[in-house]
Amino acid sequence: MEVRAHAKLNLTLDVLGRRPDGYHDLRMVMQSVALADVLTLEESGDGELRVRTNLHFLPNNEKNLAAQAALRWWEARGQVPRGLEITIEKSVPVCAGMAGGSSDAAAVLRALNELEGAGLSPAQLARIGERVGSDVPYCVTGGTALAEGRGEVLTPLPPLPPCWVVLCKPEFSISTPALFAKIDSVKLRCRPDTQGVIAALEAQDLVGVARRMYNVFEDALPERQRSRVNDIKNVLIQCGALGASMSGTGPTAFGLFDSEALAREAQERLTGVGGEVFLTRTV
Ligand code: C5P
């Protein structure tokens, strides 16, 4: 079975506080984009669970979130692990704040649900997925949604009006646990207007959403990295983006465009400056 695992972007990301369990309470508006990994699930003749990817540095064993999802699936179903080979054609940048690994895990859960004819609901798959990672529950269904709690409390939102997205992942990666640890001691300059974004989605006001996008983790980045993310955002805005922000714990920055021509211009300007640049659409 072949299945797609879409990347996500944060239209907003707010950290409300640290919890007794060490995680943080979040409030964020999530959006899927067409950019996706493609996973193929095949029975492995030798009874082993294996992951193969086109990126040599990704784990090919149980450290890979796709394999963890399969193990959690069998555990939740009360079955012994079966022989399975998961091949992942990665297109979504890794360690980029776009939930690439979580989306692969969610795709495995959706695929096993279908392959085994188990008929679990998206909410049931999300409960299995939250044990693999905080973004997995959202990735089970994707689309436009408000995510709260650790990320697993989901409320569907009206879809973002269709638009083009230019995104750029700079050449460095960010450690999510390290940035979460740092955010506790950072004085946040400003917070996203999450309610305003939700109201703009309800009014199907793309410009209203784009202008309100904000991610508190931008304030927690080390100076040099923050300045690189800001440079990307500035290029996007100069090229006509309706708004620009960083996704997740970064470092990917993206802009929303209502014009394909302007989006292509932004893509061209960012290409060659360094990092991975994509032009995609919201889904
Ligand atoms: O849930 P996941 O494994 O993706 O989270 C990775 C790390 O990010 C956690 O170990 C934790 O340090 C941090 N995190 C957090 N609060 C959240 C989600 C993640 O502190 N809501």
Image (cartoon, rainbow, N blue to C red):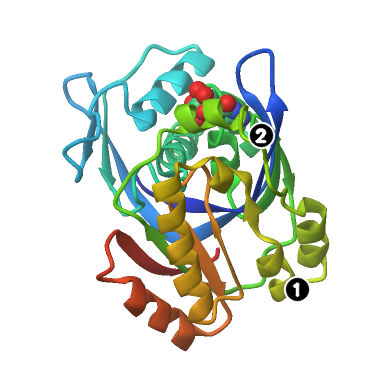
Q: Amino acid at mark 2?
A: Ala
User: Between residues 132 and 16, which one lies in front from this camera angle?
Assistant: 16
Ligand 1's image quarter is top right
User: Which residue is at 29% across, 49% downward?
Assistant: 90
User: Which residue is at 48% across, 38% downward?
Assistant: 106
Q: Earlier in the sequence, mark 1 or mark 2?
A: 2
- Kindly identify which numbered label has been placed on residue 59: none
User: Which residue is at 28% across, 43% downward?
Assistant: 88
**Above or below — where is 38 with respect to 14?**
below
Q: Residue 161: percent from the left, percent from the top?
A: 67, 72
> Could you say which quadrant of the image residue 21 lies in?
top right
Quadrant for the C terminus in the image: bottom right
The crowd level at tag 1 (other Cα within 10 Å; few <14, some 14-19, many 20+) is some
Q: Which residue is mark 1?
A: 205
Q: Which residue is mark 2?
A: 123
User: Which residue is at 69% across, 73% downward?
Assistant: 206
Helix, strand or loop under label 2? helix
